[in-house]
Amino acid sequence: MHEPIFRHADVPYYTQWASPEWVRDIVERQCDPCDDPHWRRSGFADPVRYRFWAQRLCGLTCLESALDYWRIGHAPRADLLEDALRHGVYRMREDGGVDGLIYRPFADWAARAFGLHVDVVPQAPLEHIAARLDAGTLAIVSVSAEIRYPQRPNQRQGGHLILLHGRDRHGVWFHNPSGVVPHQANVYLPFATIARFYAGRGMTLSRRGAALV
């Protein structure tokens, strides 16, 4: 039996852009992400490439939080992206778009590169994925990016990834890489609320024997 409340402490929060305080301007006012003086922080040098990819790297941002929480060394995000592309985690389309993050290539890559066990859960209630959280396990789930405004009606489910790091009987705590305050880091929402945004799929990331820090 899982205990009714479980929560990892001090999981680092990162936004898929450079600075958390810039997210609102980027997503609400369409400000140029490169106006943030820290936009090169994640290893990008080309502003065009940064603008294109930063809005698509919610999954790598979740991974980075998990790796830093478990103190697993890794390259800057721009280099993580290059490695992920080589392993089919993202696939460029002929129309210039991107397919990704693709779960099974991601799981294989994360295992080889970082020693993680990633269990792909293609169809399950959010409560079932949340129940897997334990001292060595976090989870990434697919929701609509509209979850940054949970009080508003939404039009979609899926297309964006968030990192689950805690649960109780009624809901979960999570980091949203494209969230805005107060629904950015260490957000708590009930299962019933998240269900509106949830696409019914996700992954668990495990490093067995990891201790809470």
Image: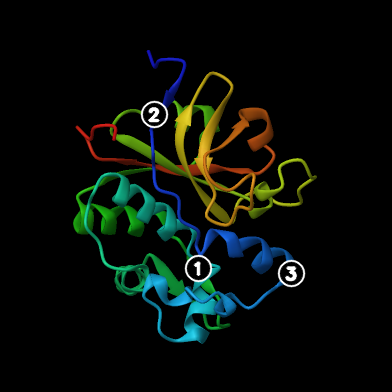
How far is disc 1 from disc 3 in space, using C-alphas?
26 Å
Badge 1 density bin: few <14, some 14–19, many ≥20, Cα 10 Å: few
Badge 3 amino acid: Arg
Measuring from the top left, give residue 116's x and y in whole percent. 24, 47
Q: Is 146 left or right of 188, judged from the image as shown?
A: right
Colouring style: rainbow
Q: Is 28 left or right of 90, judged from the image as shown?
A: right
Residue 102: quarter of image? bottom left
- Residue highlighted by disc 1: 99
Earlier in the chain: of badge 1 and badge 2, it is: 1
Measuring from the top left, give residue 212's x and y in whole percent. 29, 32
- Residue highlighted by disc 2: 132
The N terminus, quarter of image: top left
- Residue highlighted by disc 3: 29
Q: Nearer the viewer, mark 3 or mark 2?
A: 3
Q: Is 133 left or right of 31, judged from the image as shown?
A: left
Badge 1 amino acid: Asp
Measuring from the top left, give residue 74's x and y in whole percent. 25, 61
- Look at the picture and state if 46 lies above or below 178: below
Earlier in the chain: of badge 3 and badge 2, it is: 3
Earlier in the chain: of badge 1 and badge 3, it is: 3
Which one is nearer the viewer's eye here, 105 or 35?
35
Q: Can residue 42 be spotted in the picture?
A: yes
Which one is nearer the viewer's eye here, 183 or 79?
183
How far is disc 3 from disc 2 in space, using C-alphas?
38 Å
